[in-house]
Image (cartoon, rainbow, N blue to C red):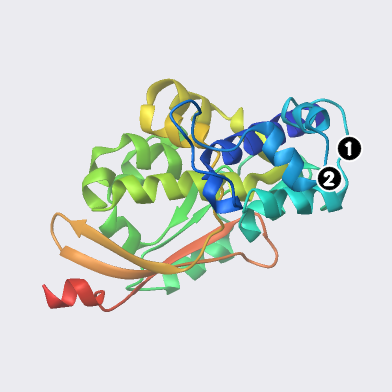
Amino acid sequence: MNTAAERRAELGSFLRARRAHLDPTAVGLPPAGPRRRGGLRREEVATLSGVSATWYTWLEQGRDIQPSRQVLDALARTLRLTATEHAYVLSLAGYTQLPTAAEPVDPAAPGHVQRLLDALAGCPAYTIAPDWTITGWNAAYAALYPNAAAVAPSERNLLWLVFTDPYVRDLLPDWETTSGRFVAEFRAEAGPRLGDLARSPVVQRLLRTSEPFRDAWQDHHIEGFASRLRTFHHPVQGVLHYEHHRLAPADHPDLHVVIYTPAAPPPEAAAS
């Protein structure tokens, strides 16, 4: 179970990470000199947010204190959090309805969802569970990523495959950017249930075996999903351009349907 102590610890870690990444000049302070590291000091964040340095230190340490929503809003402004990051902080502090504990992942997508995938002929599509286990896919996705059916079910997880399968690394010309973004999206979606998902075998294995994943995980970056253009370098079909979409069935809101619809190449690719 994801406890209140775990949520407080994650909130403190997230605030520390964002504070360390913020340029002092962004909040009107002098640039970092040779005697200070980058980022803001705790005292500076506290002063700019209207709280005491001691109280803010306790917050970063994960102590059993309850910040008000107004204080969290002030911290979000000081740390220049995005709307997604702000919502993440509020959820960790209990200002949104907490999800129930994660249910065991069904190894297969429900029949009606699988039929939806199959009906999307020509559009690679797949489903992922809350822990990003791939639970279903269609023929177009199998053509794009043949290993989906070949890997063991225990390894059929989007995060695991992105960080460990050489085929995926070759398929994604922007692998460094995309892999980091996936981790940021995973964190954003997990929210206060992150403790449950962080203990999942896949995440624990990645923390032990993948330095890029470990670096991205420790960065505490948060980013909400947004539909966007994606480019793939397929070994047989060549360069492919898709628009990346994601939907949630009303009767299975924790299950995401990911769809790649064919798209024109971006202007810079068309001009080359």
SS type, badge 1 = loop
Report if residue 134 is visible in the image: yes
Q: Neighbour class for label 2 at 10 Å: few (<14), some, many (≥20)?
A: some
Relative placement, left or right, of 268 versus 219 is left
**Looking at the rendering, which quadrant does residue 100 occupy?**
top right
Q: Tell me how far mark 2 sits from mark 1, CA to CA.
A: 9 Å
Callout 1 amino acid: Gln
Q: Position of residue 253 (x, y in %)?
A: 67, 60
Relative vertical location of residue 103 with respect to residue 208 in this rendering, above or below? below
- Give the labeled residue for mark 2: 94
Q: Which mark is residue 168?
A: none
Q: Position of residue 228 (x, y in %)?
A: 41, 68
Q: Earlier in the sequence, mark 2 or mark 1?
A: 1
Quadrant of the snapshot with the N terminus: top right
Residue in the foreground of this view, choosing between 253 and 33: 33
Identified at 48% across, 25% down, the residue is: 35
Q: Position of residue 174 (x, y in %)?
A: 28, 52
Relative vertical location of residue 90 with respect to residue 103 in this rendering, above or below? below
Relative placement, left or right, of 241 versus 73 is left
- Give the labeled residue for mark 1: 66
Identified at 36% across, 65% down, the residue is: 124
Q: Neighbour class for label 1 at 10 Å: few (<14), some, many (≥20)?
A: few
Q: Check the image and name the residue furthest to the top.
A: 208
Relative vertical location of residue 165 with respect to residue 245 in this rendering, above or below? above
Relative placement, left or right, of 174 versus 245 is left
Please report contact status of discs 2 and 1: CB closer than 8 Å, yes or no.
yes
Identified at 27% across, 58% down, the residue is: 144
SS type, badge 2 = loop
